[in-house]
Image: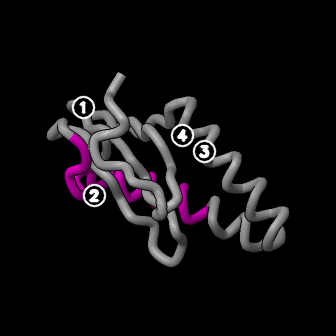
Amino acid sequence: MTVSVEWEKRAQHDRENIFLYLNREAGALVAIAADERLAGMAAILAENPLAGVKAGRSARQRKLVVPHFPFIIVYATENKNVRILRVLHTSRKIAGRYSQS
């Protein structure tokens, strides 16, 4: 069963900032690879919305670690939808900070 995956505006902004930062600091190939990895993780969530672990106070809020990159995707599951709320660097503390709006 495939579900729809939507990127919230804050998550889109996070993704753009990550791309711009990596492009500036490590070059286009690294920035493109990271962005492709984020897109691939969203595809995984479309196939398996429960791939991540519970994060925060809500049972529907989850986080998914991005392999080989220091990022976490924070998302919420709702029926047949996944809403990507944020893309955060792993050094940030996230538990319970991002509510579903």
Mark nearer the N terminus (1 vs 2): 2
| Quadrant in which residue 47 is drawn | bottom left
Q: Are marks 4 and 1 in contact (CB under 8 Å)?
A: no
Of circles 1 and 2, which is in front? 2
According to the picture, the residue beneath numbered tag 2 turns out to be 52
Q: Residue at x 50, y 53 (%)?
A: 88
Give above or below for 98 relative to 63: above
Q: Are marks 4 and 3 in contact (CB under 8 Å)?
A: yes
Mark nearer the N terminus (4 vs 2): 4
Q: Which residues are magenta?
A: 36-56
In the picture, measured across the screen, residue 69 lies left or right of residue 29, that is left
Q: Are marks 4 and 2 in contact (CB under 8 Å)?
A: no
Q: Amino acid at mark 1?
A: Glu
- Within 10 angstroms of label 3, few (less than 14), some, or many (20 or more) residues? some
- SS class, disc 4: helix
Q: Are marks 1 and 2 in contact (CB under 8 Å)?
A: no
How far from the left and from the top, in percent, is residue 66?
45, 66
Q: CA distance from mark 3 to mark 1?
A: 22 Å
- SS class, disc 3: helix
Mark nearer the N terminus (3 vs 1): 3
- Is residue 60 or residue 58 the one in the foreground? 58
According to the picture, the residue beneath numbered tag 4 turns out to be 11
